[in-house]
Image (tube, helix red, strand yellow):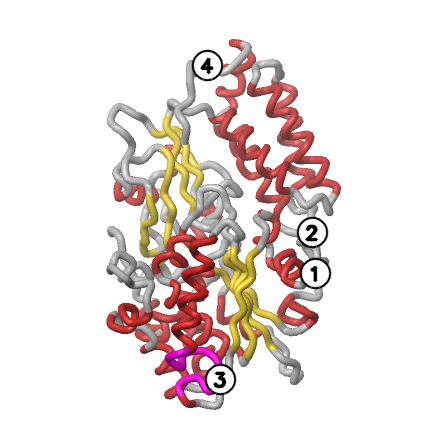
């Protein structure tokens, strides 16, 4: 297997961010098919049959998520989570910058399928250029009749509002995002009720990631059966991976799910000459490490879960033996400590404590008892918080102690890092 470009098929076409070029590449054909030839229920069934899973990290089946909305007569809302803040991940950034009309088209189709007449894009505040490109794409789509009132001459209306967040990692969690959209501090809500029942302003709400919504377009265009010819039975389709770190050609690559880890690294140019693989973070900083023994692991949801980690958002960080795992783990924990919303005691206090312990260990002033403490702390944070932030915060730490205990011991013996210098990732 090699790259399989579905979403990124036209990403390199000059001017693809404009409506005219996007239409010349077949843009909005799927929207016409959905609105003019299919009922909302048929669109929803097509997405369900495709097996599309959420590409934001959790991997929950998209069609099933849509089906949870209650039929109680209340207005429904679609929210696009474009608050991409996972360290190592920059795929949504690319989709917004190069293919803003693909996102608009995917949102209109998805909103039509769930019966929503209002939709929101919650965009990371730092993505100023992406904000401007989406504004222009929505303006062009409205003028052409792809968005707004009586879309394509039908009686379906949809208004999309663009909202810029303030750069809080926690707002990537869907209920914290909804609180932020409502003008409040972004902190996770108690669940239940879930957003499908009581989401934005208490209304039935679906929150989907950028990549998930854009994937709806080729599914509607070519059908669920076609989509299932790619990937695995339980993880069908393609996924964009942001590959960075110790590779010669870092960037965004689209693969069918189930492609071996080793093949993805080779596609990104492999490691620099003379360098040896030490570890891989497969899906962003909220995922546990993999090692050289995992190179043959298929990159799909089930296989990675069996390997003790997860696919996450696809932010793959490749680490070679010139990098200090202890230092990298400390950097990740410092990030999570800073980004904790502070609502849950295990997360608020635990990340602070773990960051301080890791700082001591990285400086060579710790002991083997500190490693036992880190393992114990990880177990007292994971699964004990309102949202998945706690699990994310400890994943790299717990796996670093499991796989790289000798690296920690070397710091104790030498009174500091055994590497003379650490190249910057």
Look at mark 3 in the image and give the residue it sits on.
149
The percent position of residue 424, horizontal first and vertical second, equals 41, 28
Mark 3 vs mark 4, CA separation in Å? 64 Å
Q: Are marks 3 and 4 in contact (CB under 8 Å)?
A: no
Tell whether label 2 touches label 1 (CB within 8 Å): yes
> Is the residue marked by circle 4 packed among few (<14), some (14-19), or many (20+) residues within 10 Å?
some
Q: Is residue 11 part of the magenta span, yes or no?
A: no
Is the C terminus in the top left, top right, bottom left or bottom right quadrant?
A: top left
Q: How far apart are the alpha carbons under marks 1 and 3? A: 35 Å
Residue in front for this viewpoint, 311 or 339: 339
Q: Earlier in the sequence, mark 2 or mark 4?
A: 2
Determine contact: label 1, label 4, CB under 8 Å: no
Around disc 3, counting alpha carbons within 10 Å, would you say few (fewer than 14), some (14 to 19), or many (20 or more)? some
| Residue at figure coordinates x 52%, y 72% from the top left | 160
349 or 159: nearer the viewer: 159
Q: What residue would you read off at disc 4?
A: 418
Q: Give me the disc on residue 386.
A: 2
Residue under the image location 55 percent in, 10 percent down: 415
Q: Is residue 145 magenta?
A: yes
Q: Counting residues from the N terminus, which is met first, the one under dot 1 or under dot 2?
A: 1
Mark 4 or mark 1, which is nearer the start of the sequence? 1
Q: Secondary structure at mark 3?
A: loop
| Residue 351 seen in this snapshot | yes
Which contiguous range is marked in magenta?
143-152
């Amino acid at each position: 297997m090699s790259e399989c470009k579905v979403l990124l098929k036209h990403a390199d076409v000059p001017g693809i961010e404009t409506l005219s070029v996007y239409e010349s590449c077949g843009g909005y054909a799927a929207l016409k098919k959905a609105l003019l030839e299919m009922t909302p229920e048929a669109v929803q069934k097509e997405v369900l049959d495709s097996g599309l899973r959420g590409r934001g990290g959790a991997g929950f089946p998209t069609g099933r998520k849509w089906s949870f909305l209650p039929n109680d007569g209340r207005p429904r809302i679609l929210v696009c989570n474009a608050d991409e803040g996972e360290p190592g991940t920059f795929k949504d950034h690319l989709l917004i910058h190069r293919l803003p009309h693909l996102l608009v088209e995917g949102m209109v189709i998805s909103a039509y399928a769930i019966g929503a007449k209002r939709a929101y894009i919650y965009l990371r505040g730092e993505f100023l250029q992406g904000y401007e490109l989406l504004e222009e794409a929505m303006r062009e789509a409205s003028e052409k009749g792809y968005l707004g009132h009586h879309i394509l001459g039908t009686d379906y209306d949809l208004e999309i509002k663009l909202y810029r967040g303030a750069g809080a990692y926690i707002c990537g969690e869907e209920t914290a995002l909804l609180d932020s959209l409502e003008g409040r501090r972004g902190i996770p809500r108690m669940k239940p009720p879930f957003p499908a029942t009581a989401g934005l302003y208490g209304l039935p709400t679906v929150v989907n990631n950028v990549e998930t919504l854009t994937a709806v377009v080729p599914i509607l265009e070519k059908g669920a059966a076609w989509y299932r010819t790619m990937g695995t039975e339980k993880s069908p389709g393609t996924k964009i991976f942001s590959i960075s770190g110790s590779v010669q050609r870092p960037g965004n690559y689209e693969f069918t799910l189930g492609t071996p880890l080793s093949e993805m690294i080779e596609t990104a140019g492999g490691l620099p000459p003379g360098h040896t693989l030490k570890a891989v973070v497969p899906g962003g900083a909220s995922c546990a490490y993999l090692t050289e023994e995992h190179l043959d692991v298929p990159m799909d949801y089930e296989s990675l879960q069996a390997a003790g980690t997860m696919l996450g958002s696809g932010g793959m960080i490749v680490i070679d033996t010139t990098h200090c795992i202890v230092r990298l783990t400390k950097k990740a924990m410092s990030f999570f400590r800073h980004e904790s919303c502070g609502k849950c005691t295990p997360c608020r206090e635990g990340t602070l404590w773990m960051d301080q312990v890791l700082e001591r260990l990285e400086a060579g002033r710790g002991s083997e008892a500190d490693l036992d403490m880190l393992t114990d702390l990880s177990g007292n944070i994971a699964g004990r918080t309102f949202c998945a932030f706690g699990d994310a915060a400890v994943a790299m730490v717990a796996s670093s102690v499991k796989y790289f205990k000798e690296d920690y011991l070397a710091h104790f013996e030498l009174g500091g890092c055994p590497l003379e210098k650490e190249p910057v990732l």
